[in-house]
Amino acid sequence: MPNPAPRERAAAAIRANILEGRFGPGEFLPGQRELARLCGVAFNTVGEALKVLEAEGLIEVIPRRGSRVLRPASSVTVRWRADGRVLPAGLSTLGAGTDRTVERRHASEEVAGALLGQAGMTVQLRRSILEHDGTPWAVRDLYLPASVVDSARVLASPEYVDEIQVLTEHGFGETGHLSHWSARPATAEEAQLLKSGGSPVHIVRRISFCEDRPVCCELMTIRADRVVLSRSGGSVPSTYKSP
């Protein structure tokens, strides 16, 4: 296998020191010249390595002050419900999220197939970053056929709306769904959005149907290193209170 680039070697060395507790949460790392000496790389290489660690959420680079170690991202318990939706424990909605993106684009083969269309079909993407304790735990991508958005124009707005309610109000109420959970390595884009450093991700794909027509495809990309999955089922008396 090829040797890692100097930037990756330096990032790995600094990361190891952080994870082993040599640099604790809230502490500033040594200056870049000292880090360059410790890692055996050039001064500019350390700057690139720090950018990698900042993207992972391990440090924050503060201009004219240095690089401060962040506390580890806390875990979040999520439930995969019987209706195929993923929600943090104790919540009834995902909420608005941050860094919302709404745009029309050409669908990937996966999304087009889920929507029973042709690869490259026009879809509306509604993306949001879901956070817990100030750090991303998932990226939610909701894809809708252009024909559905043309009927429910509010879905083309960047403002937060309850898509389920909007679809129901415009005659696209859900009559069935298909949900699938899988895991794989993160792509470079996913690692950047999730500040995960490339750790594996869970993918939950949920297709919503109105009669025989798929009206949306939701993709949840979840940080595997942060999420504790909880799923329960059964039939109990209505007076029973779940512990």
Image (cartoon, grey):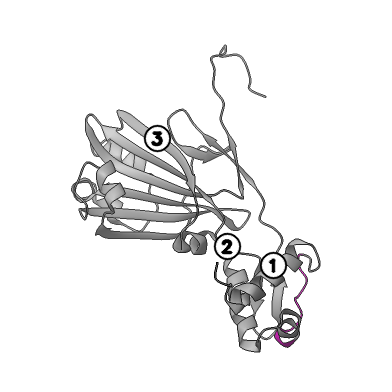
- What amino acid does circle 2 point to? Gly
Marker count (numbered):
3
Residue 187 x/y as whole percent: 46, 59
- Return the residue nearer the eye: 110 or 220: 110
The secondary structure that dominates the magenta segment is loop
Residue 63 x/y as whole percent: 64, 83
Which residue is the site of mark 3? 179
Q: Secondary structure at mark 1?
A: helix
Kindly indicate whether the residue at mark 2 contacts the one at mark 1 (C-beta within 8 angstroms): yes
- What amino acid does circle 1 point to? Arg
Q: CA distance from mark 3 to mark 2?
A: 27 Å
Q: Secondary structure at mark 2?
A: loop
- What amino acid does circle 3 point to? Ser
Kindly indicate whether the residue at mark 3 contacts the one at mark 1 (C-beta within 8 angstroms): no
Mark 1 and mark 2 lie on one chain; the one further toward the N terminus is 1
Which residue is the site of mark 1? 15
Q: Which quarter of the rendered picture does the N terminus lie within?
A: bottom right
Kindly identify which numbered label has been placed on residue 197. 2
